[in-house]
Image (cartoon, helix red, strand yellow):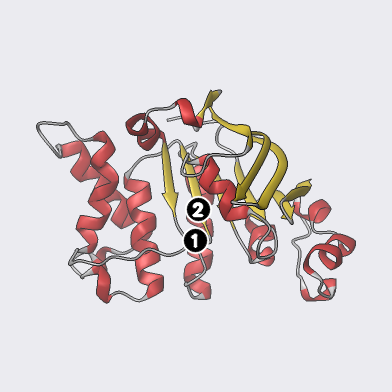
Amino acid sequence: MSGATLAVHGLSAAYGARAVLNAVEFELRAGEMVALLGPNGAGKSTLLRCATGALRPSAGTVLIDGVPVDELERPALARQVAVVPGQTVVAFPLRVEELVALGRVPHEHPLLGPRPADRAAIDGAIERVGINALRDRDVRELSLGERQLAVLAMAIAQAPRLLLLDEPTVHLDLRHQVAVMELLRDLSTRDGVTVLAVLHDVNLASHFFDRLVLLDRGRLVADGPPRAVLSAERIRAVYGVDPALVAVAQT
């Protein structure tokens, strides 16, 4: 499986009269792994919403494999793109295995339902994320971190070519944060999945991602390797903190 390309061209977006993104432009190659950084309100989650077609931009476009997102039919989009939101709410009884199985819906036969390949993908995703012990648990009874892992397994079961994640480590302890970062790297390098992850933790981002895209107040202010993007001057200007507090990876 090869990853999908993602191109963001002149993207602007707003909520009512409030502008959130302003002429943002960058591209991801197939199989590339990129972290999207920026302070609160920079427009990171809004950009992901535009990338999935959930929000129509006020200007510009997002293309997946050269096709504008708004021209892709939803079933076709679901077979290519998986999304891991920052928080998932489940209001009814649902076992973890059943949640992960939802990732196979775009691939199931409309009449025959789940096939052996679908069941294998579900089992493989649960095993890969390391949540086999949670398989029969009610999702509503999980901790926020456990629920986040279950949603990640659902996205992996979906077998996407493009994986979009909004703060995938926000509820996880340090061990699981590192495990998820290593899993994303493995999905990119071994499976060829294109990964775009919104992160607030610049330390994690700089250690596990070779390329960072930095937004500030709706504009793209830097795009490149961690040491170049997270320079002392830029950390001070964008985040308003002492750069000594940020441990940027040296390679």
Q: Mark 2 points at which residue?
A: 165
Q: Is residue 179 left or right of residue 44?
A: left
Against 243, is 219 above or below?
A: above
Residue that appears at 60% across and 60% down: 199
Residue that appears at 69% across and 37% down: 26
Residue that appears at 19% across and 64% down: 95
Tell me if I can see residue 6 in this picture: no
Residue 181: x and y in percent read 53, 58
Residue 218: x and y in percent read 71, 52
Instruction: Please name whichever residue, 191 or 156, is drawn nearer the observer in this view of the structure.
Output: 156
Q: Are marks 2 and 1 in contact (CB under 8 Å)?
A: yes
Q: Mark 1 points at which residue?
A: 168
Q: In this view, does 245 lie to the left or right of 83?
A: right
Quarter the C terminus occupies? bottom right
Against 210, is 191 above or below?
A: above
Q: In this view, does 154 lie to the left or right of 239?
A: left
Residue 102: x and y in percent read 25, 49
How packed mark 2 is, by other alpha carbons closer than 10 Å (few <14, some 14-19, many 20 or more), is many
- Label 1 sits on a secondary structure element that is loop
Residue 45: quarter of image: bottom right
